[in-house]
């Protein structure tokens, strides 16, 4: 279940995240006209920008036409499965993988001894 599905029946404006890759760090300030900047990475030179979901295609076209923008991607937040059963399954799989790795390392150490 996603957050946007929970908010469908409320008067809250639906927002969509965009990842905007830039040529230069200083250009991030020019993006404020297109939405709310919630994160900026100086090292990787990208912004996470939220904008109204109804206007998302127009905003992407405008951003792609800017000379200082390298690339624009939609956030895959909607595709995430945040149900408790899915999270529990992931934790179980990660724990099993960690145990298997530890067992292999212990076997290697015993074999070398």
Image: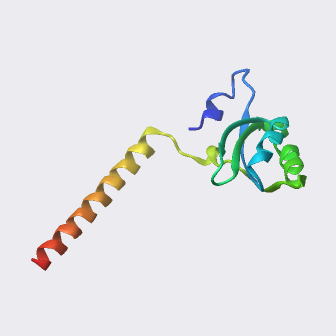
x and y, in percent, of residue 102 in the image: 23, 62
* Residue with the most extreme left position: 113
Is 23 drawn above or below residue 41 in the view shown? Answer: below
**On the picture, is 2 further left or further right than 63?**
left
- How is the structure coloured here? rainbow
Q: Position of residue 82 (x, y in %)?
A: 51, 41
Q: How many marks?
A: 0
Q: Residue furthest front?
A: 26
Q: Position of residue 95 (x, y in %)?
A: 30, 53
Residue shown at 62%/44% (left/top)? 77
Q: Nearer the viewer, residue 83 or 105?
A: 105
Residue 4 appears left or right of 110? right
Query: Taking 108 as reference, is 98 above or below it?
Result: above
Residue 96 lies, with reference to residue 31, above or below; the image says below
Q: Residue at x 26, y 63 (%)?
A: 100
Q: Residue furthest top?
A: 11
Q: Quadrant of the N terminus?
A: top right
Residue at x 42%, y 42% (from the top left corner): 85
- Horizontal and vertical percent for residue 112? 13, 79
Q: Nearer the viewer, residue 98 or 82?
A: 98
Residue at the outermost bottom position: 112
Quadrant containing the C terminus is: bottom left
Q: Is residue 109 left or right of residue 26?
A: left
Q: Nearer the viewer, residue 73 or 54?
A: 73
């Amino acid at each position: 279940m996603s957050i946007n599905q929970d908010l469908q029946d409320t008067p809250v404006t639906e927002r969509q995240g965009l990842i905007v890759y830039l040529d230069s760090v200083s250009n991030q300030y020019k993006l404020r006209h297109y939405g709310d900047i919630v994160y900026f990475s100086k090292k990787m030179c990208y912004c996470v920008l939220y904008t109204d979901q109804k206007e998302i295609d127009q905003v992407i076209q405008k951003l792609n036409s800017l000379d200082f923008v390298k690339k624009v991607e939609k956030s895959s937040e909607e595709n995430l499965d945040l149900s408790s059963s899915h999270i529990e399954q992931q934790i179980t799989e990660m724990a099993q993988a960690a145990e298997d790795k530890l067992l292999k390392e212990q076997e290697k150490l015993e074999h070398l001894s």
